[in-house]
Image (cartoon, helix red, strand yellow):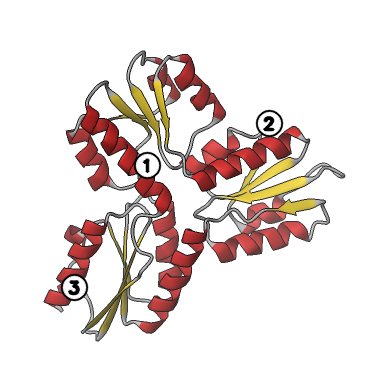
Amino acid sequence: MKVITAKTAGFCFGVKRAVDKVYEQAEKGETPVYTYGPIIHNEEVVKDLEKKGVMVIGSAEELSQLHEGTVVIRSHGVSKEIYDMIKQQGLHLIDATCPFVLKIHNIVREQSAKGARIVIIGNKSHPEVEGIYGWCDGGAAVIATEEEALNFTSTPGQKICIVSQTTFNYNKFNKLVEIISEKGYDILVLNTICNATAERQTEAAEIAKAVDAMIVIGGRNSSNTQKLFEICKNECENTYYIQTLVDLDVHSLPSMSCVGITAGASTPNKIIEEVQNNVRNEL
């Protein structure tokens, strides 16, 4: 049986950078180390860091109770309010925000300061989008569906600046932009989907078209993994979403000659290799 593993599967640059920074701080053991939210959407990594003493801050309220230690901002980034609060609390700040996300923060800050209405194409509850929203002067419209795009309205004559969550589905982004563009507003469209995300999605779709079954590995809360699953499922009916090898029952898979594997940006190589080896050995 043939197994095709996506070359783009696993940690992206921004995630690896953030995870490395947390482990680096944990190894120093000088002060309490916290991350604002789980450093990545992968339970295995978060549990391992907990064993090393790294604690997760879940809210601004929890953050307000801290008066010493190091706080690492994860790759998703945070709002200006949280960023300022960390400094005001006198905490040591390590900013591991992905550079591509920081670029979006700068764009929305500058454009909203000029009076533009910001539109964020993305999932409203995703931490990256929450962070981007928090750098917009005067708020922003967050759009994730065609219905929301169709219902979107803005003040006549006001310039609109459209950005995207870095892990959003590339084709969906284009479709939503097309719907908004047809409304006749003065629009500046900035495709801020990360190149690594676009490449990962494209490769996943190509592999899914060519295999009998597709396995997508990643955390249940990982937005980019969820989108990979949607893309693969659209191309291959036998697509399975797992977090680790424990979730995979290879014997329940239908008889097949070729299996594809891809993984989200928060999936460690160790987990990908375990799944890959198991599929090869068991099927």
Q: Is residue 271 left or right of residue 138?
A: left
Q: Is residue 11 left or right of residue 196?
A: left
Tell me the CA gap for discs 3 and 1.
30 Å
Instruction: Answer with the quarter of the image where residue 237 lies.
Output: bottom left
Residue 125 in sight in this render: no
Q: In the image, residue 191 lies at what x, y percent? A: 63, 56
Count of numbered circles on the image = 3
Residue 79 in sight in this render: yes
Instruction: Answer with the quarter of the image where residue 210 lies.
Output: bottom left
Tell me the CA gap for discs 2 and 1.
27 Å
Label 2 with label 3: CB-CB less than 8 Å: no
Residue ID for mark 1: 18
Label 2 with label 1: CB-CB less than 8 Å: no
Determine whether 73 is above or below 244 in the image: above
Which amino acid, by three-letter code, is at mark 2?
A: Asp
Which amino acid, by three-letter code, is at mark 3?
A: Val
**Of the residues under marks 2 and 3, which one precedes in the sequence?**
2
Image quadrant where one finds the C terminus: bottom left
Foreground residue, 255 or 11?
11
Residue ID for mark 2: 137
Q: In the image, residue 53 lies at what x, y percent? A: 21, 29
Q: Residue at x 69, y 31 (%)?
A: 138
Crowd tier of the residue under label 1, counting other residues whose Cα lies within 10 Å: few below 14, some 14–19, many 20 or above:
many
Nearer the camera: disc 3 or disc 1:
1
